[in-house]
Amino acid sequence: MKKNEDLYKNELAKVVQLEKENIFLYWKGRVALYALLKAIGVGENDEVIIPAFTCVVVPNAIKYLGAKPIYVDIDPNTYNIDVRLLENHISSKTKVIVCQNTFGLSSNLEQIVELAVSHNIFTIEDCTHGFGGVYSEKPNGTFCDAAFYSTQWNKPFSTGIGGFAISHHKKIKDNLITVNVDLLKPSVVNNISLSILYFIREHIMIHQFYWTMLKAYRWLSRHNLVQGSSSGKELTSTTMPANYFKGISKVQIRKGVLNIRSLSNTMLIRKKNAKLYTDYLKKENKLHVSPELFDNHSFLVYPLRVKDKDKIFRLAELRKIPLGDWFCSPIHPVVTCFEQWDLDTGKYPLAQEISSQIINLPTNLSSIEPILSFLEEIKENIVSHSSSIE
Ligand SMILES: Cc1ncc(COP(=O)(O)O)c(C=O)c1O
């Protein structure tokens, strides 16, 4: 295990240009966030600022520590915190600001970090979508005090489920070592069920069955019948599930060492496809990702805004087009009982509107011709450039 673990850390270290001693491996990305918050000393009554357009596991990690998530509405161009609103949300209780690299789009980190430093607040980059990309000539995730990444199924490279944290900050690193002493060891059952999932994914989950398999996987994981991304409890309550704080398993490490090799090639494909989407949308005067806003995007997916999301998903399923649904609400995939997560959705109009419109186009396909034809078919439904919300 140790030899493979070192190998894996070395591979990750090369991408983020840090020593392998700055890298910490976990069962999932959310566990890495929880560990980082704990290492920073976040606890009862502290506040952690996050974008109001994220995955529910992010506020969960904060709530598990007794702290409070403070949401900030997003900038419609970057899908990250709107920097202009940030200062108003800082209080004497703020311990951390989480900047989110949504869909692989790093943004405004200089301003966020500068503001955080001036208030003596730590910054963590949620880089779960952005491993392998670059921002202001630095590898994604290295701009803040710390960052966490995900290697779950649809991430830049996959270990099925999985995640890691990085930090170059001495105090955070030292504390992480202490915090990690409590990590649970994945069980034999965990290892076996992950191996079965790898087999299913590699041999059965072919393009044609995308929608059927996606629905089946989500249903099974919600009912805790497979090693899913999120258990039912994580989506319905803010109580920490048993066995949450878990380290990485042998099978994940082995997968990581293998799959990280394809990262640079996948990144080239993602960027090429993203450019094709942008060119098409620009030509049609539709809303698109603005290339000038981002230094060197790592398009995990391509965000597209449509007027009737349900209709587009139904049509995509019929045409066997693999679309993603990040994020269907300000704390995806939760759509009710927001107050449990201290979220008053009425206060975040842009996040609300965007989550009702957004779909994700795949960027990792060798050919996106079928997707471009699909876009042509749904053209009238795509939000146009002039109707963009500011
Ligand atoms: C923005 C964001 N943060 C955190 C996570 C959590 O990552 P993981 O599933 O590895 O725990 C996700 C998962 O997709 C995410 O989209």
Image (cartoon, rainbow, N blue to C red):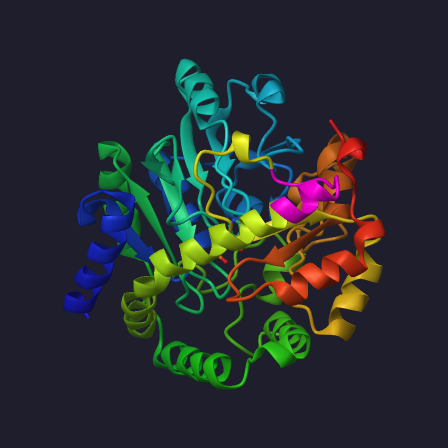
Is 282 magenta? The answer is yes
| Residue 57 visible within the image | no
Taking 315 as reference, is 62 above or below it? above
Which residue is drawn at the image coordinates 48% and 55% (left, top)?
270
Image quadrant in which the C terminus is located = top right
User: Residue 98: where, in percent of width, then height?
Assistant: 49, 35
Is 166 magenta? The answer is no
User: Residue 226: where, in percent of width, then height?
Assistant: 54, 77
Residue furthest toward the top?
Answer: 118
Which residue is drawn at the image coordinates 32% and 62% (left, top)?
260
Pick the residue in front: 77 or 59: 77
Residue furthest toward the front?
Answer: 283
Which residue is drawn at the image coordinates 41% and 54% (left, top)?
268
Pick the residue in front: 6 or 47: 6
Which residue is drawn at the image coordinates 75% and 44% (left, top)?
284
Quarter occupied by residue 185: bottom left
Taking 209 as reference, is 328 above or below it? above
Quarter occupied by residue 116: top left
Pick the residue in front: 375 or 31: 375
User: Residue 308: where, in percent of width, then height?
Assistant: 84, 53
Q: In this view, does 202 lie to the left or right of 378?
A: left
Image quadrant in which the N terminus is located = bottom left
Q: Is residue 223 left or right of residue 31?
A: right
Read off the magenta span.
279-289
User: Residue 64: where, in percent of width, then height?
Assistant: 51, 47
